[in-house]
Amino acid sequence: MVVKFFAHIRKLAGNTKERTDVKAKSLYELLDKLSKDYGNEFQSKVFPNNTISDEVIILVNGTHISHLNGLNTKLKAGDVVCIFPMIFGG
Amino acid sequence: MLSRYSRQVVYNRIGEKGQKTLLDSHAVIIGVGALGTVIANNLARAGVGKLTIIDRDFVELSNLQRQTLFTEEDVKNNLPKAEAAVRHLKEINSEIQLEAVVADFNATNAEKLIRDVDIILDGTDNFSTRFLINDVALKHKKPWVYGGAVADTGMVMNIIPGVTPCFRCLIQDPPVSGHTQTCDTVGVLNSTTGIIGNIQAVEAIKILLKSEAVLKGVLTINIWQTEFDKFEIEQDKKCPACQQGKYEFLNNRTPATTLLCGQNSIQVLPQQNRDISLPEMANRLQKLGEVEYNRFLLRFKTDQYTITVFPDGRAIVSGTENPGKARSLYAQYIGN
């Protein structure tokens, strides 16, 4: 599985572009592991109170997770997970 | 006539034929702030034959750091942004048609404003207008180019009805929380909006020329880290907008603002019910002005305006009777 971080989410993940070493069976498990790896700031912006922040977009293989099974979306080897913020200034 | 465009006519992907297509095209730019001024400048210089510029706001001194068409004189003259933009664009290219629309782009006027255009450029600063643009663009089969920028990061996506995923495939609903980052709370670099606006403009040209090279998927940038990334996105087979044709934002014609008679105030209603944490909001806003709050409301003073916010997201903006200005302040400080 590849987890990719974009825009300012990358900063919250210690300036990591992508991770290939994380194993998780569900999106919930993945976000829980990432929150433990990157600490409070990552968790509060991405996974507050173990829910997905409404300011973050997560795609699994290009599909928005709200169109899959949300936090219960199953993950497997080879999946690509993209995590990025909503950006609406202009 | 084409000589003024010689440097791009000689560029082989445009050529004379492409230039004529641009001259026959009509683009609308919704919102002429940091992104919109960059887009309008490029499209006017590139010879897009007709530009309609829509904006609800006035030029202020703090705009000049990044809104590249405007001058101190525009601030002194209290010019509406659409009007000031068109004045400067006429000096840049007097051979194209330019139209200023000083108005709030909303569900009541959206269809009329985009009916005759070939492409829509997003220069807005809030999500609710972008969801509305998405609806009206899909309904009338008009391509549009989303751009967003905050601090050192930005994003661009082309939405071509019937060809690409739409904005609601990327973002299902507007965020409801009261702590969304805005340019007024975390700032924005002019290079961020400059690069994003420039990319939006060239994507518009590619779409108008029906180029195969249009950006597919989503581009994100972080200019402080000098990072550019692209990723693919899939069409949502159940998307209410592009698959089911439910245009919820276009069909929501409830007035979002109400003038409060004799109070020099406007009430602004959120697009949907919100549950705002007033202490969190106070913490965020106290860097920007005077804040006081109790469990029922939060009062924030900035410049000559006072914004009173209730936990359900309703706000009263005092110091103006202009609904566009009140909505703009709401978008700047409270979020969408």
Image (tube, coloured by chain):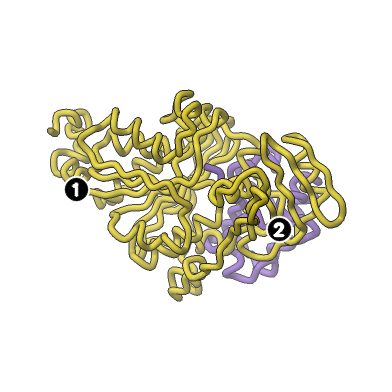
Question: Disc 2 is attached to a residue of which chain?
Answer: B
Element under disc 1 = loop
For disc 1, the chain is: B
Q: Residue furthest front?
A: B262
- Taking B244 as reference, is B281 above or below it? above
Q: Which residue is drawn at 40% across and 43% down?
A: B200
At mark 2, the secondary structure is loop
**Which amino acid does the dot numbered 2 rest on?**
Gly
Q: Residues within 10 Å of mark 1 (few under 14, many from 20)?
A: some
Give the residue at mark 2: B313
Q: Is residue B286 left or right of residue B201?
A: right
Disc assigned to residue B24: 1
Chain B color in figure: yellow
Amino acid residing under circle 1: Asp
Residue A4 shows up from this direction = no
Q: Which chain is displayed in purple in the rendered image?
A: A
Q: Residue B172 carries which label?
A: none
- Where residue B156 sits in the image (x, y, percent)? 46, 47
Please name the residue shown 53% across and 35% down the image. B227
Image coords of residue B81 (percent x, y)? 45, 38
